[in-house]
Amino acid sequence: MREPILNKARFDGGWRRRASEERGVVLPMAIMILFVIVLLTVAVVQAAVQSNTFSNQQTYADQAFATAEVGLQTAYHRLSSAVEGGESLVAGDCFTTKDTGSGPTAKGCPAVSESVGANSYTYYVEPLVSAPKNCVGLKVLGGAVVQRCITATATVHGVTRRVQERVAGGASSLPSSLSSLSTILLKNTTSLVGNLTANGEVTPGPATVTGTITGSKINSGFKCSGCTEVVKAETLGSKYPEVNPEPYEISANPVNNQANIQGLANYNSATRDFSSAGTMGTEASPYQLQEGTYNFCNVSFTQTVWLEIPKETAGHPTKVTWYIDSPERPGLYKCASAGKVKATNGMCIINASENPANFKIYDWGDNPNHSKLSEFNFTNGLCSGHALIAELYAPYTLFQATNGGSISGSFLAGEVLATNGLKLGAAGGWLVSSATAAAAWGTCTKSPSGEDPSTGCY
């Protein structure tokens, strides 16, 4: 049987037609596949970019947070250091101290901005009054507590972080002390709030005593209000403490001494005597002592004298140091005579900041002869209504007060003798402590409101 003969022309034409039709489909498909590949590539690139951006943002956020935390800790350290150093800044309105700056400012609490590495921070220390601003940490209640809010911000590549912490400061009673290298004899006393320490006998008198009494013998007659008695010989040591002559010599230098004491009335630069036979100042207008070091051979007043150590100078409490010189001291500029302090009819030295560290008195006395004691003598009252708040170091001097007076701080003398109502009181001080365990932080997204840094970013 014969096979059918195919029509070659018909076959070739059909094949060519189908091929032509298929060529019209391949191009669109190739374009679609290429488009999908491009979309996937773009998506991968965008994901990578977004991931990198997010990583950078997180890095910037971490850096900003760490930098702001440095600012907060810096502010806290400076505030604490200033207060511990005797400055009454806890009670101030603002605190803007830098390493090279000083003190609280007027209300408005300006910022402190400083660099740390390639970044910088800004901190504010603001008061928290009876109607406190928004600040991280629970409000501290009870007692004479003053609160401050520390806010610190930092921005790194447009990413801002803020940290904030509440701190609290309160008055702290620092015990006053009255010490003697021989004996303490107090007569007709009323109140002794502090510690009495002597190598020899201690007689507190009829006072109510709050504190520790230490001596080789403690005579009865006082009233104990939570006090402690310790009988111990040579409490302060068997030898007199050494006194360094160098500060006396430096401060007695005529040029240096005149510079420090310039403007001081009733001062004789030739003899280094600070004296007056008449009244000097009043309670309402006491004579102002400038900050600095004073070197006297004699301090002598026969009538009532009112002196004051001002509370603050440009944000800092005024610090005054008296060196009471003596002929026994070695050196080129030692005194030719005397070396004593003696006041009759009242000598009132007002320590306005009420910090004993702001008024220091060093009395050379009869060192190193020990044959007799120099005088540090107040008659007819130290001061009416005001305590002598100071730190006294006079191991070769008789500290004697007659007819009343109040002292507060740290007093060391060769011998202590007081009659008719000497009072020993607690000295004031300040402590600063954090009121929260950790700082809070967040992204600053809104504008500040007024002068409150806690409401936004600066």
Image (cartoon, rainbow, N blue to C red):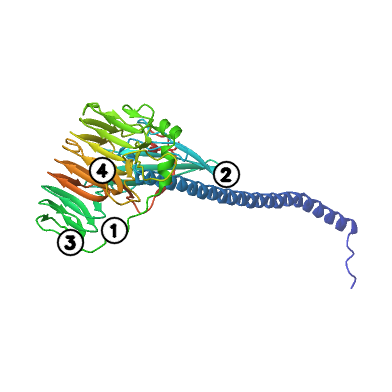
Q: How crowded is mark 2: few (under 14 residues within 10 Å), some or many (20 or more)?
A: few
Q: Residue at x 35, y 51 (%)?
A: 368
Does residue 176 appear in this view?
A: no
Front label number (3 vs 4): 4
The alpha-carbon separation of the residues under discs 1 and 3 comes to 14 Å
Residue 422 picture location, percent across and down: 16, 45
Read off the residue under disc 3.
217
Does label 1 or label 3 sit earlier along the sequence? 3
Read off the residue under disc 2.
118
Residue 83, located in which quarter of the rendered image? top left
Residue 248 picture location, percent across and down: 40, 42
Residue 247 picture location, percent across and down: 41, 44
- 38, 240: nearer the viewer: 240
Front label number (2 vs 3): 3
Badge 4 marks a residue whose secondary structure is: strand
Labels 1 and 3 touching (C-beta < 8 A): no
Does label 1 or label 4 sit earlier along the sequence? 1
Residue 375's label in the rendered image is 4
- 206, 398: nearer the viewer: 398
